[in-house]
Amino acid sequence: MGTCIICGSSVDGRICQTHEEDVVFEFRGDDANQLIPGRYYVGAVDGFAEFGVFVDLAPSVTGLLHRSEIPGRIESLDWDEGDAVYVQVDEVHGNGNVDLSWSIRQSERDFRGKLIQDPDAETTAELPEDESAAPAGAVEQTESETEPEPESEPEPESEPDSEPEPEPESEPEPEAVDETVEAEAESESQEPVHVSAGELEEFVGELVSLEGELTSTRQTSGPTVFELTDETGVVECAAFVEAGVRAYPEIETGDVVRLVGEVERHHGELQVETEELDELSGDARETVLARLNDALDERARPDDTSLLVEDDDIAVVQDGLVNAATAVRRAVAEGRPVIVRHTADVDGYVAGAAIERAVLPLVREEHAVSNAEYHYIDRRPLDGDFYGMEAATNDVTSMLEAEQRHDEKHPLFVLVGTGSTRESLDGLGLLDAYDARSVAIDGGYADGEAADAATVLVSPTQDGGDAVRTGVLGTHLAALVNDDARDDIAHLPAAAFWTDTPDAYADAAADAGYDADELADIRDAIALEAFYQSYEDKRELIADLLWEENDSLAAHVAGQFRSKLDTELETARRHLSARGEDGVTFDVLDVGAFTHKYDFPPQDLLLDALFRDRTDEVDVLVGANEDEIRLRSTRHVDARAVGEAVAEELPEAGVTPRGADDGHIEFLRGEREDVIDAVVDAVAAQLD
């Protein structure tokens, strides 16, 4: 029986079930069936194939990391044969084949400890014999490179009657003794130099003191590693009391501390070997916090606050965009993950991918860990129109698990094309209950209630302006987040328009090398891919489409989009029902009857295409399925006001407006025909 190296609970071995995925194992077996699925192992790259990477977990045990498990192309991996890598064992087949999955943690320092799985040991989780234990796959190389120490000659046995010869007395070495004593005395009397994290390069080998906030803590099988952040940067500080035992257990993440230790290099990176660690309180704590906040605000505010291109509609919210960009940049500087939640449509993907593209280089600059970009920035499309309780519950659950497992800070949630109406209040409220900040940007119509719920809300309609495309708004935000990304994302706003692209955006795209046909291919391809697996980020595929990493890809996917859409358009046109009311012309379509429920195109895209086709002939298009109505109009129609009027007229129909002015109307399917008639009357009255 042992104790868990992370939480201290009694276990058979050295890790409890709750924390088993937080450590990495060195495998010392010789049979794949001895592996334990779910565990993370250190291995060595054995070779590459078109379908994946072979990884040796032991000299006679090899697994396959399939290309579908790799977040990107195999060619993009910075791996060479023989490199130590970290993988998770998914499954061991009866024939001995081992399926591996990707680990975003690609350094032993990213785990909270290292353990040994040796079939000859008493348990399947043992502490390493020492901290220099070689990783699996590198053992043979280590042994071959190390010359064996010569065995000492055995001492000859003395003759029974002979007297032992006296050993010659060694000469005293007074100088060496004096130097040791002198060094020890000097060490004891040395006063630490007060420095900042950004200055440590100049103090290697010296005793220093630092003041800052502890932003993370992880327990390894050896020392406890604290991450200290001050106004100039971040540094790791190791503290050791006993193998696998938590040092300074009274100090917690988030505490403001004074740390004294010696600056050393550990695997090529600076680290402070901690000798003293004290929590600061009172005025001393407030002074450090004020210094941190001032420095973070200064670092986070964009240097260039100009818009990507001049646009009067965007200028209305320029200050709000600067505030939103500052929040995003500060999250990166604080070591908070940035989670981008966007609608699964062209606008959402264009805006979300632009923000992701801008944040990625900042994450790489801030965090030296090679896989930081997969840990500190995540883009998650929403499987719906609003940031409701389901999405928020999933996000909070992931957030709390990351906090418990990895001592991770709460993320900043960037809500794109959502989070701006009262339907998102419950979700925003759940984030707020856990002190998770949120930034909501929406080019459509927002309402005032959400403005108070989100930490930052940016929507032109909230500031007296007109609605804009969310893809355009999100790209302007991305330009403010990272000035160096401006040229890279200059063509994206033009890809968000279906018709009548403003000259400023068309010119910016042309200057970036994208003509109108290429932009149309990109837009249509994104629309198609956004529909499939709408909840997946598809990071590499979306990047290939938006930045034409594959010259023929966008045109190929766009061709599929047009073929599928044209087929349904041709059918839907024949089933439009024309109406007139108070001088307003309507087309009404049973949109649910002319779209496939689980195939492309979805109802919104069909309605948009029909309306573009009929703009010269009708004022309003009404799309009704079994229990929802969506409106498209040549003049602005307040869909919420229409829904409220119909709800008052038909109190038994369960009419509920959803979203802001540009939302939709829900009803009980048994009242469908009466609701359609009432909606037509209410829209005509509003436009009269």
Image (cartoon, rainbow, N blue to C red):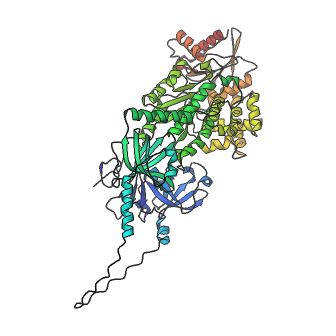
| Left or right of 85 on screen, residue 282 | left
Residue at the far left in the pictured view: 161
* Quadrant (top left/top right/bottom left/bottom right) for the N terminus: bottom left
Query: Can you say whether 543 is above or below 50 in the image?
Result: above
- One can see residue 601 in this view: no
Residue at position x 35%, y 55% from top? Answer: 243
Query: Can you say whether 350 is above or below 176 in the image?
Result: above
| Left or right of 331 on screen, residue 581 | right
**Residue 82, located in which quarter of the rendered image?**
bottom right
359 or 569: which is nearer to us? Answer: 359
Residue at position x 40%, y 35% from top? Answer: 284
**Residue 135, located in which quarter of the rendered image?**
bottom left
Query: Can you say whether 446 is above or below 651 in the image?
Result: below
- One can see residue 310 in this view: yes
Residue 627, horizontal then vertical, whole percent: 55, 22
Query: Can you say whether 156 is above or below 122 in the image?
Result: below
Residue 633, horizontal then vertical, whole percent: 68, 19
344 or 300: which is nearer to us? Answer: 300
Residue 476, horizontal then vertical, whole percent: 65, 31
Residue at position x 62%, y 54% from top? Answer: 75
* Quadrant (top left/top right/bottom left/bottom right) for the C terminus: top right
